[in-house]
Amino acid sequence: MGLAGLAHAADDSSVHKIGITVGSMGNPFFLATIRGITQQASSQAPNASVQSVSADYDIGKQASQVDSFIAAGVDLVMFNAVDHAAAGPLVKRMHDNRMTVIAFDVGAPGADGTVTTNNVKAGELSCQYIVDRLKGKGDVVIVNGPPVTALIDRVTGCMGVFAKAPGIHVLSSNQDGHGSREGGLAVAQSTFVRFPKIDAIFAVNDPTAVGVELAARQAGRKDFFITAVDGSPEVEQSLRQGGGLIAATASQDPFRIATTATQLGIDIRAGRAKTGTVQLLDPHLITADNIASYRGWNASRS
């Protein structure tokens, strides 16, 4: 169901103000989603104003942003929850103020609609690559992240794959890299001290993977490879150039997630789509072998 491609009236009067709150504007993924939301809003509700803010993975900050949206009379909130468990009361608060809430990239309890990558599948793809390359035998580390559904699902998918390969030994899976380069760097530095032998590392997103790779270069470690999820421009470039430790990433399409989610919100607001709609978009494994055909986040979109 490609809602982003449906034709509607040029000016949808059911949406006047759109608020966007994302995990971190330091992550290029979220900059791409903001671009997609803004473009879709411009096409389908051109008279609507759009405001975007960064929660910096702080639920208290995101709660304050929700209050600001309420005060401003926002009627459609594009909501990237930074803490799944704590997001429910925020969704209720927005509903109490007659807002339509669309969860994108990650889920949020009670959201009117949800559009995400199939993150379980993304974790499966990335970790099946590890199993296949190691021929089912080796010591691996999972660098985890914040308690949001996307990352929880990726680890669930990854662990499911590893569970089917008894020769794979998971050394660590609960260290939080905060979904960032800095967090990945810090977790990797301590992990290298704890485990002198590592064959592969699964990082829950590309920024974390880039941080792990940086730590490896600093430590002179070349004895393992890294997989992740995102398909970000930085990892795309690394795969095109070759020679890095990041060997594969399960790509997401943040622009498509954003445009699809925005159209869903506009349609729900106007009564053209059902509340509770959930859409999962398929990821694709990107490696050096197929990077030539990859259409990345910065590709021209219409």
Image (spheres, rainbow, N blue to C red):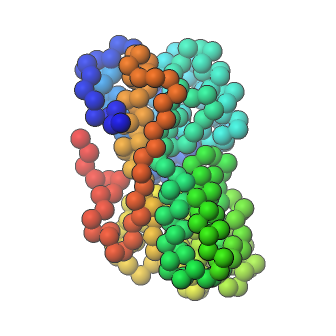
x and y percentages locating residue 32 in the rendered image: 40, 46
Q: Is residue 23 visible?
A: yes
Task: State the residue at coordinates (48%, 30%).
Answer: 277
x and y percentages locating residue 227 in the rendered image: 51, 69
x and y percentages locating residue 243 in the rendered image: 41, 81
Residue 144, quarter of picture = bottom right
Count the numbered circles shown. 0
In the rendered view of the protein, which quadrant contains the N terminus?
A: top left
Q: Is residue 101 visible?
A: no
| Image side of residue 296 versus residue 112, left or right | left
Check the image and report above or below for 38 versus 146: above
In the rendered view of the protein, which quadrant contains the C terminus?
A: top left
Residue 69, quarter of picture = top right
Residue 194, quarter of picture = bottom right
| Image side of residue 302 versus residue 257, left or right | left
Task: State the residue at coordinates (49%, 49%).
Answer: 118
Looking at this view, is 155 or 101 the one in front? 155
x and y percentages locating residue 136 in the rendered image: 58, 80
Task: State the residue at coordinates (50%, 56%).
Answer: 121
Task: State the residue at coordinates (49%, 72%).
Answer: 129
Check the image and report above or below for 152 versus 278: below
Check the image and report above or below for 243 versus 112: below
